[in-house]
Image (spheres, rainbow, N blue to C red):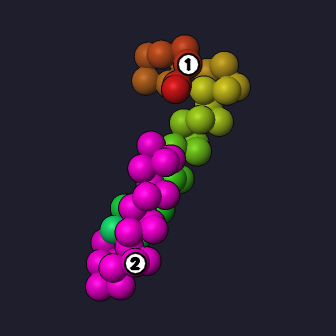
Amino acid sequence: MITFGVVLIILGWLVSGLAVLKSIGYLLVVVGVILWILGSMGRSVGGRKHYY
């Protein structure tokens, strides 16, 4: 999720007219980092013990 978000951010910068790609990319990166932190703390995320 983090990787896909970074790819969308880069595509949004390359194609200057698509600010939607950057917005979705930033959102995916933030959600991915939050899930990664929660999963590494040992908390179950979405019914799973680990989030990969």
Residue 8, image x and y in percent?
39, 61
Q: Secondary structure at mark 1?
A: loop
The disc at residue 14 is 2
Give the residue at x 52% y 26%: 52
Residue 23, image x and y in percent?
39, 68
Nearest the viewer among 19 and 47 is 19
Q: Which residue is mark 1?
A: 50
Residue 34, image x and y in percent?
58, 42
Give the residue at x 55% y 14%: 49
Give the residue at x 45% y 66%: 9
Three-letter amino acid code at disc 1?
Answer: His
The disc at residue 13 is none
Nearest the viewer among 7 and 23 is 7
Q: Which residues are magenta?
A: 1-20
Q: How many residues crowd around disc 2 within 10 Å: few (fewer than 14), some, or many (20 or more)?
A: few
Q: Secondary structure at mark 2?
A: helix
In the displayed image of the protein, which residue is found farthest to the front?
14
Residue 5 figure quarter? bottom left
Is most of the magenta stretch helix, strand or loop?
A: helix
- Residue 23 in view in this figure: no
Three-letter amino acid code at disc 2?
Answer: Leu
In the displayed image of the protein, which residue is found farthest to the bottom?
17
